[in-house]
Amino acid sequence: MLSFFSSKIKLMVGIAAIAFVITAMLYVSSLKSAKNKALLAVEELQSQVILLQNANKQNLATIENLLDEKQLIEQTISSLEAGNKKDRKTISSLQKKLKDFEKDPANKVELSPVLKDTIANIEKEREKRRTSK
């Protein structure tokens, strides 16, 4: 009878060993599956990083272009301001010459109505620009 129990124990131990091996194989399989999923996730993240790097490069290029345009605009504004300053000096000089010319009695001449209107319009526009600043 002891041999009967011993063969049963051996059978149970064999079944337990097979169950353990199957469990271990399932565990290893699930680890491999998890590893593959993790590798796919890493590849996706690497792909996203590359896309973000490219977007950052494009953004930096755009910013550099905008900075270049800003510098060009600032130079243009400075140039226009210098030209405007020069024009104001020229106008001021011409106004002084005109006043000096008008002071001389030999130059007393009546201006034509069209010229008077033109001068009046120029002075109105000049006054508008002064008050708008």
Image: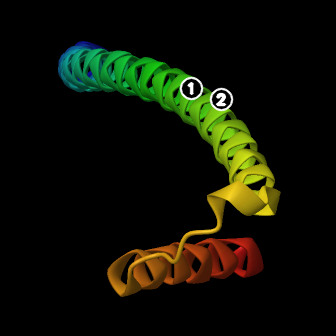
In this rendering, is residue 125 above or below 77? below
Q: Position of residue 53 (x, y in %)?
A: 36, 16
Instruction: State the residue position of label 2.
Output: 82
Report if residue 11 is visible in the image: no
Q: Residue at x 81, y 60 (%)?
A: 103
In this rendering, is residue 74 above or below 18? below
Badge 2 element: helix
Can you say which quadrant of the picture contains the C terminus?
bottom right
- Horizontally, residue 108 falls left or right of residue 26, namely right
Q: Residue at x 56, y 26 (%)?
A: 79
Q: Looking at numbered disc 2 in the image, what kind of residue is underneath it?
A: Ala
Q: Residue furthest front?
A: 106
In this rendering, is residue 77 above or below 55? below
Does the residue at mark 1 contact the one at mark 2 (Cβ under 8 Å)? Answer: yes
- Horizontally, residue 78 falls left or right of residue 133, namely left
- Horizontally, residue 112 falls left or right of residue 13, namely right
Kindly indicate the quadrant of the structure image that contains residue 99: bottom right
Q: Position of residue 51 (x, y in %)?
A: 25, 23
Q: Position of residue 26 (x, y in %)?
A: 20, 25
How many numbered marks, from 0 up? 2
Q: Residue at x 61, y 76 (%)?
A: 123
Using the image, tell me which numbered label, if any, was put on residue 123: none
Near-viewer residue (133 or 127): 127
Q: Residue at x 50, y 28 (%)?
A: 76
Using the image, tell me which numbered label, if any, was put on residue 79: 1
Can you say which quadrant of the picture contains the N terminus?
top left
Q: Looking at numbered disc 1 in the image, what kind of residue is underneath it?
A: Ser
Near-viewer residue (47 or 7): 47
Q: Residues within 10 Å of mark 1 (few under 14, many from 20)?
A: few
